[in-house]
Image (spheres, rainbow, N blue to C red):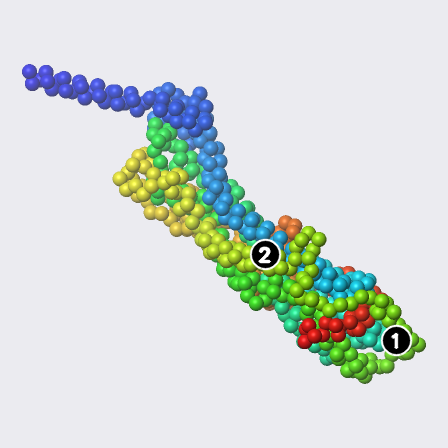
Amino acid sequence: MLRLETLLCTFSALCFAAKAELKARNCSEVREAFAAKGFSFSHVPLQEIPGEHLRVCPQGNTCCTPEIEDAFGQRSKQEFGNLVDEISHNLRSIFVSRHQKFDEFFLELLENTERSLNEMFVRTYGKPYMQNAEVFENLFAELKRYYTGGNVNLEEMLNDFWSRLLERMFTLLNSQYVITEDYLECISKYTDQLKPFGDVPRKLKAQVTRAFVAARTFVQGLSVGREVAQRVSKVSSTPACMRALTKMSYCPFCQGMPAIKPCKNYCLNVMKGCLANQADLDTEWNHYIDAMLLVAQRLEGPFNIESVMEPIDVKISEAIMNMQDNSAQVSYKVFQGCGQPKPSGMSRSTRGVPDVFNARFRPYNPDERPTTAAGTSLDRLRIIWNTMQHSVVDIKGKLKQSKRFWSSLPEEMCVETRLTAGNTTDGHCWNGHTKGRYFPEVVTDGLTNQVNNPEVNVDITRPDTFIRQQIMALRVMTNKLKNAYNGNDIYFQDTSDEGSGSGSGSGCTEACPTDTDVAASEATLVEADRSEPVGGASSTRMPPPGLLTALVLSVSALHMRWR
């Protein structure tokens, strides 16, 4: 009787084992999972087959064929790229939207400031100003050309503006003499000594330079950050990475366990190996973010571009009054240094005076701010600027959040809601071979630290050239930002101490360069700029008499306003 019971138990155990083995060899669950993933299950066997043909997944009994394994590799690569793109989408959107917002504001501010000055001077000086407005048009054209990335030396351009204004005013104040081109050239040599416009040019130069350098460099910084984020987010997978991704995400299907997810630390090692070069971007990215935050402070401070540009018409008028008050002394010193010019045979009272007195003048009322045809006034720009101040606070917060973005990508990807089974310690996860605990340590970030990565075979002797180009672009931009924070336009600094040289920032109305050719080309740009005439537009040295005579005779009407 006892032997019969023993025999029955043995037979039952064998039957149970046989049923279990039969169930394990059935691939129907895998076929359903394939269909749910969008694969064709025509290549999926009904029962497990020997896996010696597999190149990535374990070679025991399997539900996968070589064709299935290849399809898994392509799908893994695609899903990896899509996931990086998804996680970086918010970062890229921040840089795209903020770049556009700040760029549009700065350009609108420039256009409205020019329009404001033009309308003020038209109402105040009338036809004589309209006939000679190119002096001021050239000023704003050069400011805009600088902001949008032109090779303009702000300091030299502003010096040129005041020199041209001095020449015109001196000629009109001394219309009884013949003022030649050579004589004007002599006058320009004494500009610094004469200071005909008082302290206005010096103060305005400091304010405009700081404001425009900060504004242009900040917008270019946003553009470079946008380009780097967009380019680095388009990841390319090495063959070793593709194998590791396939093994992690899809080899459980071959083992008949399609529902199981990778262990957290296993996923981290795979991602750190696949994103090793991106992690190396992190140090330079953090330096770049710190420099952007510094320049953002300049957009909030006393030299922000709005506070400099809004009263520029008043400041130029103040300079003209200073010239009028000092005209006798200026002329005397010029005559001493350059000699007495030849008489023209015409008195000041007969040269251009009728045009002056035929013009209509009235005192400037500060409450009557100029309004553009589109209904945009400087009052509206103040409202916009208040909004922009909030935008500066906003972008500073976003920039701070983006620090360590690239080194944190593996952690972002290996969360339970995306790839892994979470922080499981009980072995209910895929460890690359079977269902069980994952024992290897998680490697450190960066390319050189992948030498000991147990999951991805990374060649640490061959850094990704594309990523190194982005690191160089960030390094160049960081240098520009640091200089902009100090008010320096590095196009015009002596680069003899810097091996590669440095280039200017730009508003990037066209595509911003972010490759290594930036650093290589900038030394050439420095030399080209120094040989280029400043100012861009040519203008006649001997001006029509109307404008400055009108300014001199009518400035008294404005005198009480600005005194």
Left/right placement of residue 476 relative to residue 412 reads right
Q: Which residue is mark 2?
A: 384
Q: Which quarter of the rendering shows the C terminus?
A: bottom right
Is residue 531 in sight in this rendering? no
Does residue 268 lie above or below 78 as drawn?
A: below
Percent x, y of residue 186: 80, 76
Percent x, y of residue 261: 35, 36
Q: Residue at x 47, y 33 (%)?
A: 75
Does residue 316 lie above or below 49 as drawn?
A: below
Does residue 53 lie above or below 545 as drawn?
A: above
Q: Secondary structure at mark 1?
A: helix
**Nearer to the camera, 126 or 399:** 126
Of pointers 1 and 2, the one earlier in the residue sequence: 1
**Nearer to the camera, 203 or 493:** 203
Is residue 29 in sight in this rendering? yes
Amino acid at dot 2: Ile
Left/right placement of residue 232 relative to residue 267 reads right
Residue furthest right in the image: 345
Q: Residues within 10 Å of mark 1 (few under 14, many from 20)?
A: few
Percent x, y of residue 555: 75, 72
Left/right placement of residue 508 relative to residue 27 reads right
Q: Which residue is mark 1?
A: 349
Q: Residues within 10 Å of mark 2 (few under 14, many from 20)?
A: some
Whole-Å distance between the Cαs marked 1 and 2? Answer: 48 Å
Percent x, y of residue 213: 61, 63
Q: Residue at x 65, y 57 (%)?
A: 377
Residue furthest left in the image: 1
Q: Residue at x 64, y 72 (%)?
A: 203
Examine the image and state in which quarter residue 270 appears. Answer: top left
Amino acid at dot 1: Ser
Examine the image and state in which quarter residue 4 appears. Answer: top left
**Nearer to the camera, 352 or 359:** 359
